[in-house]
């Protein structure tokens, strides 16, 4: 029977009781982290933890847990649920009631995990056909850089893509530049140069995005953060979508345009190695 961690203790998932008035449900007042678990360890933990803390501070939520304390609870949660290869979700929402003016800024912690039995990221990489979602545009605002609970635009894009029989959607911002995909950052590869939208374009400050930018995966000559539109995207050799769950996947088709995955597959192998090496950052925080 699965367990979750809620309000400083492990409980059976079936016993989880959250008030109908909780602020996560009423206002999307909180944030979350989705973390890949490989070989019993949350990978790129230090990166995820720092983004979680940055987001909590940005939202003005009080969060009093130390990193070591959090790591021990996560380790116990994974052990209780026998999760070796799967996913971990951490959610923090503002506790108490109130309307737009909250009663308190105290944070409430909820953690859950699940097993999928897959060691590492998919190799070869997943290939998806994408729909260009232009019905609603993503604001060019720093709020989009944080992993807050409200993902209504992304869900609308996913629903529309699925209705058209496609597995991915490309979301534009208010300047009609590329922002991101449904649950991934986007990269385009052309002549050995990899580009990804700037954070100022309103995209998420993704964990794997940061790893790719700071590394030389797949023998990339150069990685640039700059704005680009549909025309440049359609001229690219490869289009990568990166997230914590799948690592790197590719968009193989948009309309009649097709794209390959040669460099992405090489980069995925190196990303898997980096993920395993990152486990030390988590284990060093266990008591």
Image (tube, rainbow, N blue to C red):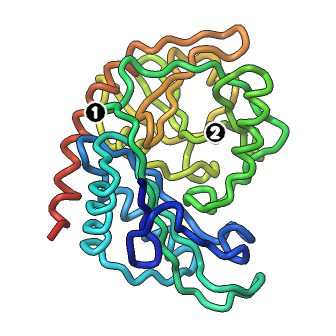
Residue 16 — which label? Answer: none
Q: Residue at x 74, y 38 (%)?
A: 157
Q: Residue 197: x, y in percent?
A: 56, 41
Residue furthest toward the bottom? 103
Instruction: Tell me the element at label 1.
Output: helix
Quadrant in the picture for residue 273: top left
Nearer the observer, 91 or 141: 91
Tell whether 221 sits left or right of 163.
left
Q: Residue at x 69, y 53 (%)?
A: 140
Quadrant in the picture for residue 258: top right
- Label 2: how many Cα within 10 Å (few below 14, some 14–19, many 20+): many
Nearer the observer, 81 or 84: 81
Above or below: residue 235 compared with residue 244? above
As measured in the structure, the alpha-carbon distance from the residue carrying label 1 to the one carrying label 2 is 22 Å
Q: Residue 141: x, y in percent?
A: 67, 59
Above or below: residue 113 compared with residue 63? above
Q: Residue at x 46, y 51 (%)?
A: 34
Nearer the observer, 90 or 136: 90
Residue marked by disc 2: 182
Residue marked by disc 1: 272
Tell whether 146 sits left or right of 24.
left
Q: Residue 213: x, y in percent?
A: 38, 41
């Amino acid at each position: 029977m699965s367990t979750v961690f809620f309000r400083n203790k492990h409980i059976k998932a079936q016993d989880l009781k959250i008030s109908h008035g909780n602020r996560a449900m009423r206002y999307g007042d909180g944030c979350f982290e989705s973390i890949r678990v490989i070989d019993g360890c949350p990978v790129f933990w230090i990166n995820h933890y720092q983004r979680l803390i940055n987001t909590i501070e940005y939202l003005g939520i009080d969060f009093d847990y130390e990193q070591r304390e959090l790591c021990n609870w996560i380790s116990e949660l994974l052990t209780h649920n026998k999760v070796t290869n799967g996913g971990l979700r951490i959610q923090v929402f503002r506790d108490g009631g109130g309307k737009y003016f909250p009663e308190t800024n105290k944070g409430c912690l909820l953690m859950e995990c699940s097993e999928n039995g897959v060691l590492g990221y998919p190799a070869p990489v997943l290939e998806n056909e994408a729909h260009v979602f232009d019905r609603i545009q993503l604001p060019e605002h720093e709020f989009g850089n944080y992993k807050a609970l409200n993902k209504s635009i992304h869900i609308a894009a996913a629903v529309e893509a699925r209705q058209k029989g496609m597995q991915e959607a490309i979301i534009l911002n208010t300047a009609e530049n590329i922002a991101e995909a449904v649950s991934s950052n986007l990269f385009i590869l052309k002549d050995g140069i990899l580009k990804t939208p700037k954070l100022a374009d309103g995209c998420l400050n993704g964990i794997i995005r940061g790893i790719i930018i700071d590394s030389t995966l797949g023998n990339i000559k150069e990685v640039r953060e700059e704005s680009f539109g549909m025309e440049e995207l359609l001229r690219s050799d490869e289009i990568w979508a990166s997230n914590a769950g799948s690592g790197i996947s590719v968009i193989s088709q948009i309309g009649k345009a097709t794209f390959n995955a040669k460099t992405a597959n090489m980069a995925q192998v190196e990303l898997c190695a980096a993920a395993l090496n990152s486990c030390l950052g988590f284990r060093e925080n266990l008591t």
